[in-house]
Image (cartoon, rainbow, N blue to C red):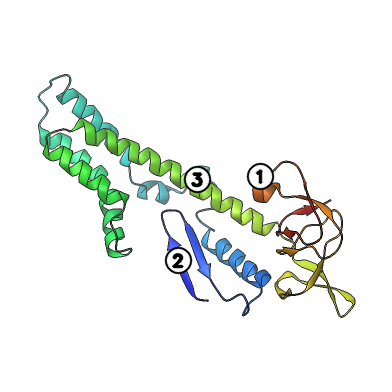
Amino acid sequence: MKNVRVKPAAMSVAVTYKSDKVSDAKMRSHLHDLIQAASVVVVLKNSTSLSETQKETSWPGLQLSAVATTLAVLGGSLGLPIPPLIVTLPIALATLPIVQRAWSGIRVERKLNIDFLDLMAIAITIFQGQFLTPSLMLGLIEVGENIRDRTARSSAQQTLDLLSSLGQFVWVERNGDKQQIPIQDVQRGDTVIVYPGGQVPVDGSILRGKALLDEQKLTGESMPVLKKKGQPVFANGDAN
């Protein structure tokens, strides 16, 4: 393994490794185990059955931004005598997650991220005495964060389902004999046999024959694709 890059915001991991040291099937099996182990709580647990502890630890950023927006409208457009400190307090509390992410980007990633720019914009508008603008900005940021989290969880679940749908055994041809072996034992250069109605277990190219492959899980294409000799195929395609 050469290096590993982790993107917490996108909930993704990029692994660079030497393909001549480990087979693609074995690496895919390891990745499946890692994703399954890392996503036991976040991915596999139904979002509708959150525990009371998780509900208590969730930061009420959207509620705080709504309170700040209401106070800013009452004190600005309607002219009610609301002290600026009272309006600033919910804005400051709602900004705490942004401060944490901005500091994490500077300390861990060594760069200024979008959270740092958001923090600067919020601070500047507050110093200018404009409370409605940062309140609305915080609300939009929180909505965007919720959408991103939902998308990341959905993508992680789909990836896990994709890897879990692979069979545990494959047919290979070695020294003229057909053998059924575990998928993690497939080596580079093996001739893998896929029968009609079966599933492509590993990435490779067609040596003999042709088939209609259903690659909807991989590409979203609704119609099967005709694959002939020499063309590449990818794991999880269904052969017809």
Question: Which amino acid is tagged 1?
Answer: Gly
Asked if residue 46 lies left or right of residue 145, the reply is right
Could you say which quadrant of the image residue 163 lies in? bottom right
Q: Where residue 151 is drawn, which disc sits there? A: 3
Q: Tag 3, which secondary structure?
A: helix
121 lies above or below 76: below
Q: Residue furthest top?
A: 78
Q: Considering depth in this image, is 154 or 46 the residue closer to the camera?
A: 154
Q: Relative to residue 225, is residue 219 drawn left or right?
A: left
* Any part of residue 238 in sight: yes
Q: Is 155 on the left-hand or right-hand side of 176?
A: left
Res 34 quadrant in image: bottom right
Name the amino acid, label 3: Thr
Nearer to us in this view, 64 or 210: 210
Amino acid type assigned to the residue bearing label 2 in the image: Arg
According to the picture, the residue beneath numbered tag 2 turns out to be 5
The CA span between labels 3 and 1 is: 17 Å
- Mark 3, Cα crowd under 10 Å, few <14 / some 14-19 / many 20+, is some
* Disc 1, SS: loop
CA–CA distance between discs 1 and 2?
Answer: 27 Å
Eyeballing the image, is 103 above or below 91? below
Q: Which residue is drawn at 27% across and 45% down?
A: 118
Residue situated furthest front in the rendering: 230
Residue 125 position by quadrant: top left
Q: Distance between the residues labelled 2 and 3?
A: 20 Å
Q: Which residue is at a point 79% across and 62% down the rendered structure image? A: 206
Q: Residue at x 40, y 46 (%)?
A: 55
Residue 228 position within the rendered picture, expressed as x and y whole percent measured from the top left = 81, 56
